[in-house]
Image: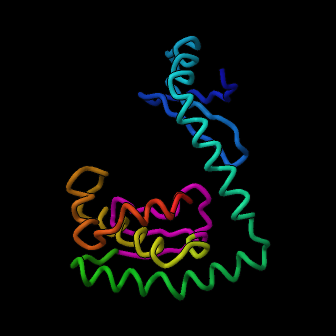
Amino acid sequence: MHKYKLKRSKRKTISLEVTKELEILVRAPWNVPVHELDRFVERHGNWIESSLARRRTMLENMPEPSPEEKEELKRRAKEHIPGRVAHYGSIMGLSPSSIKITSAEKRFGSCSPKNGLCFSYRLMLFPDEVIDYLVVHELAHIVHKNHGKSFYALIDSVLPDYKERIRLLKGQG
């Protein structure tokens, strides 16, 4: 049985996360009994083990950048990513309301309800194939606010090799 940290809130579902500190975090509604959470963690043991292994590999291959390296990565992201958004936006016929470069650690990109795109400077640690996938992924959220079939069909129409790019992003390529 895996040991885990528990965070309860007003949420409706149970979720699992492996943190960058290699801790297992369970988020759960207030009313779910601990024995049910234990069973949930046990049922997801294989996922936990593969996530821990993937996280360890990422930590080994991508140590935390120094403050100087962070500033350089942010500068490069501000130079590079807006051009990629413009390129793929013109192909897809989509235009975000804004583009921001952030220091997000858990998300490489996001799309706001008002269609503003955010990208983490950490994307600059990846090859261009991964950066382009994340750009197309976030642009697709302008049209589809979920990860349904239509969302992935739109990505596939622009990047037919997107699944390989996802493997690169996850360190499995």
Residue occupying the point 47% across, 74% down: 131
Q: Which residues are magenta?
A: 97-122
Q: Position of residue 24 (x, y in %)?
A: 65, 35
> In the picture, residue 88 is in which quadrant?
bottom left
Of residues 30 and 63, the one drawn nearer to the viewer in this rendering? 63
> In the picture, residue 37 is in which quadrant?
top right
Task: Please state, as top left, top right, bottom left or bottom right, where the N terminus lies in the image.
Answer: top right
Residue occupying the point 69% across, 38% down: 23
Of residues 115 and 26, the one drawn nearer to the viewer in this rendering? 26
Q: How is the image coloured?
A: rainbow
Residue pushed farthest front? 173
Residue occupying the point 29% across, 78% down: 95
Q: Position of residue 137 (x, y in %)?
A: 36, 65
- Residue 115 falls left or right of residue 108: left
Residue occupying the point 69% across, 83% down: 72
> In the picture, residue 120 is in which quadrant?
bottom right
Magenta span has 102? Answer: yes
